[in-house]
Image: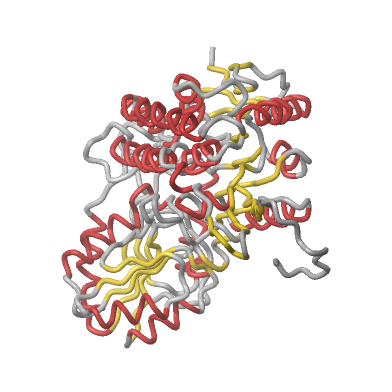
Amino acid sequence: MTQKVKMLVNGEMVTSQSQEWIPVTNPATQEVIAQVPNATTEEVDNAVAAAQEAFELWKDVAVSERARVMLRYQALLKEHQDEIAELLSIETGKTFDDAKGDVWRGIEVVEQACNVAALSMGETMENVARKVDCYSYTQPLGVCLGITPFNFPAMIPLWMFPMAIACGNTFILKPSEQDPLTPMRLAELFLEAGAPKGVLQVLHGTKEVVNQLLVHPDILAISFVGSVGVAEHIYKTGTDHLKRVQAFAGAKNHMVVMPDAQKKQVINNLVGASVGAGGQRCMAISVAVFVGNSREWVGELKDALAQVRPGAWNDKGAGYGPLINPQSKDRVLKLIQEGKDAGADCVLDGSNCVVEGFPDGNWIGPTLFTKVTRGMSIYQEEIFGPVLLVLEVDTLDDAIQLINENPYGNGTSIFTASGAAARKYQHEIKVGQVGVNVPVPVALPFFSFTGWRKSFYGDQHAYGKQAIRFYTETKTITARWFEDDIASGPNMTIELK
C-alpha cells in the first residue's frame, strides 16, 4: 500500500482523519510514492491549541537549554544528511549532490540558531537620568506559522522553525504537499534531539488549510516562501488580521557580464546558476546581460549549456533532475513557445528533451534565448525552468537601468575585474542581494536573505539578526530604586528627574 504521510500534532505522529488525500509522485517516473492529507478544520485547530499550550511552558525555558536542543539537532542532521538527501531526491527529482546542498544550507541556519543567546541580547544603559537605569529584553511572540515551497523542502523549513523555536516561540509548519516526506523526517529528528512536546507541529494540506491558519487568532507571525500571487495573498490576509508577516516571492535575477571578466569563469558560473536544479530556484540566474564586447561569448555559452543533460537523482552524470510536476513542465513549455512566437531566437531548445529509461519524467533540456526584448512574456515572468535569456547592452549604466526597471529585486550579480565597476554596480542597483563574481549571492546565515521590491513583502527578512527581530518583541524597562531621601513633591511632567 502507498505510504500515508503522518502529521506531527502535540508531540505525536498521527494519521489524519481527512477524507481527502493528495498523491505525492516521483517527478522522474510519475510513480505515486505517498499520499498526504488535506488536514481537517478540527485537526488545524487542535494543532494550534497544542502549540499555544506548549508556548506557556517553552517561553520560560532558559535560553541555554533552547540552544542545546539546536546543538543536538544540528548534530543529528549532519549524521543523517545523506539519508535526508536521498529522500529529498526521490520526491523532488533533484540530483543527489544538489539535494545534499539543500540539506547543508539548512544545517547552517540551525547552527546559527545555536547562537541564539548572543543574538537575543538586549541593551543596557546606567544613569539615563539621575539614579535611573534603562535596559531591554527580547521576548518570544507566541505561536508562529511557516508555509514552505516544494523547491527546497529541507533548507527553507530549516530557515524558519529552528530560529523561531530557539527564540522561545512554538511553531506550526505547513510544508508543500508536493514533497512532504523530507519535512516530516526533519520533524522526526527534531523530536529525537529532545524538542519538548508541542513545540513543533506539522500540518499538511492545500489552500483551505493555509487560509484557516492565516486568520487563526492564536497565530501571531507568518513566514512564507513561494510565488508572487500567493505571497501577496498571504501578506495581505495576515496583515489584515494584524499579524506579523514576512513573505518571500518571485524573482527575475540578472547576471551582468563585463568585457573585462574572466570568460571561462563567466560561462561556467552562468551554466550552473541558470539550469542547476532545473532552474527551480528563486535565486536562479534567468537573464544574462552581456555588456559591450562580452556579447561575443554567447556562442561559447550555448556550447557549454548544450553539454548539460538532465537525469535521475542517482545518475552521477546528470546536471539536474526533472521539473516537479507535469503542470510545471507544461507552463515552461508554453513560455518557451511564447518566446519563439514573440521573435526571440531560441538558439538552444530543450523542449523535446528525452531521458532514456524515464519516458514519463518531467524533462526539459537546457534552453537559451537571444534577441530577447523587455516586453516579451519570457522576460516579464519568472519561468522557473532551465531557460536562460540573453540581453545585450552597450554600457554598465544601461545594464543598471535595465535591472532597476524590472519589478523584482531578489538577487543579481556582476562579473568583472574592475573594482570601480563592481562598486558602482553594488551601490546603484536596486536589488537586495548582490554578487560580485558570485552568481548566486545567498548570504550565509549570520547575515539575512534580503530580497527587495516585488520579491519580498514585509519588514524583517529570514535568518540572521533580522530573524531574531521578526520572531521576538522588545521590552524596555526603566528602573529606579529609591534610597532614604524622599523627593520634595510629584513630578508633573514626562521628564525623568
Taking the image as shown, residue 149 lies to the left or right of residue 425, namely right
> Quick one: 117 or 344, which is closer to the camera?
117
> Quick one: 454 or 20, which is closer to the camera?
454
Place of residue 383 in the rendered image (x, y in percent of width and height, measured from the top left): 48, 58
| Image quarter of the C terminus | bottom right
Instruction: Let me know if residue 315 appears in the view.
Output: yes
Q: Is residue 251 above or below residue 108?
A: below
Instruction: Let me know if residue 362 appears in the view.
Output: no
Q: Residue at x 63, y 54 (%)?
A: 231
Query: Hey, which quadrant is residue 89 in on the image?
Result: top left
Q: Residue at x 39, y 69 (%)?
A: 254
Q: Is residue 428 above or below residue 206?
A: below
Q: Residue at x 39, y 35 (%)?
A: 359
> Quick one: 160 or 384, which is closer to the camera?
160
Place of residue 353 in the rendered image (x, y in percent of width and height, measured from the top left): 35, 47
Place of residue 423 in the rendered image (x, y in percent of width and height, measured from the top left): 31, 78
